[in-house]
């Protein structure tokens, strides 16, 4: 599914990623974790073909990121740039992911697929609700539906729990678990929530410009590795009694 080999990215004198190598198999769920400035967003940009790299290579579904057909990958950004005062419905926003442009008129097949994607993330009843009337958690699900509407093989998410409450966050992770388990969609998720990453993700990638650890999530994101990356065990200083895992 994905092979990253000796990836190095420099911005002038700053080295954002230094010799990063790892490989991901189809159907795996990867959490990318690290402190601010560790290269997480840079890695996502490289995978999406949005940032050049100085050295190394990336093979994604047998393609370079720049040549990968767009329908094979879905992306949910952390920062939503759409003005929510724009008079649009949830269904229209999802349909825009099918065209990669705004659907001023939605065709029958596009409407059907958008509705299916909204039902897939549990908000089919909000299909015709205006974006301005959605809660933060609902809007995040609409963006997830937009990414899933093309039935991608790979789903990439940048901090999907940002700006939503604990209940909405748990609902989001439940959806991602189901998409990964039942549909076999490979997921790469940047997150600061290392406890959720231990619990939900099959694999963890811990960065601090260089690779700190990669492997099964409970091993890669263990307390010792988190201390190496962050200087302490994690943001919340929490662990399950007895085994140090979430």
Image: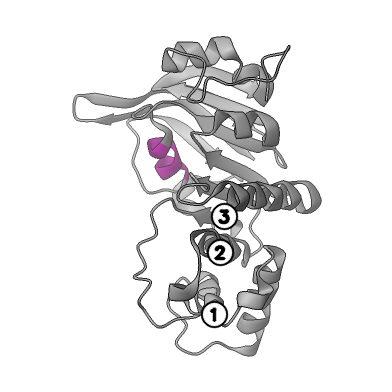
Query: In which quadrant is the N terminus drawn?
Result: top right
Region rendered in magenta: 41-47
Gap between marks 2 and 3, in whole Å? Answer: 22 Å
Q: Residue at x 61, y 76 (%)?
A: 126
**Would residue 153 be found to the left or right of residue 78 on screen?**
right
Q: Secondary structure at mark 1?
A: loop
Q: Does residue 43 show up magenta in the picture?
A: yes
The residue nearer to you, when weighing 232 against 43, is 232
Q: Residues within 10 Å of mark 3 (few under 14, many from 20)?
A: many
- Mark before the other along the chain sequence, 2 or 3: 3
Q: Position of residue 68 (x, y in %)?
A: 52, 53
Residue 42 in sight here: yes
Q: Secondary structure at mark 3?
A: strand
Q: Residue at x 42, y 12 (%)?
A: 231
Query: In which quadrant is the C terminus drawn?
Result: top right
Which residue in the protein does label 3 denote? 73
Which residue in the protein does label 2 denote? 138
Gap between marks 3 and 1, in whole Å? Answer: 27 Å
């Amino acid at each position: 599914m994905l092979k990253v080999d000796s990836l190095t990215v420099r911005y002038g004198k700053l080295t954002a990623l230094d010799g990063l190598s790892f490989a991901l198999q189809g159907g795996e769920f990867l959490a990318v974790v690290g402190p601010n400035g560790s290269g997480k967003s840079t890695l996502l940009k490289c995978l999406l073909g949005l940032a050049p790299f100085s050295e190394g290579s990336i093979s994604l579904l047998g393609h370079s990121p720049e040549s990968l057909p767009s329908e094979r990958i879905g992306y949910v950004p952390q920062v939503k740039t759409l003005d929510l005062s724009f008079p649009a419905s949830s269904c229209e926003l999802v349909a825009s992911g099918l065209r990669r442009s705004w659907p001023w008129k939605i065709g029958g097949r596009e409407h059907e697929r958008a509705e299916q994607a909204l039902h897939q993330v549990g908000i089919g009843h909000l299909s015709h609700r205006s974006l301005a009337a959605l809660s933060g958690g609902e809007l995040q699900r609409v963006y997830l539906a937009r990414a899933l509407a093309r039935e991608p093989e790979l789903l990439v998410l940048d901090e999907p729990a940002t700006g939503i409450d604990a209940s909405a966050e748990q609902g989001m992770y439940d959806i991602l678990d189901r998409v990964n388990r039942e549909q076999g969609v490979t997921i790469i998720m940047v997150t600061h929530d290392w406890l959720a990453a231990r619990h939900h993700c099959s694999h963890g990638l811990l960065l601090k410009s260089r690779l700190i650890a990669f492997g099964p999530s409970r091993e890669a994101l263990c307390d010792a590795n988190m201390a190496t990356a962050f200087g302490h065990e994690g943001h919340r200083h929490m662990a399950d009694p007895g085994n140090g895992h979430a």
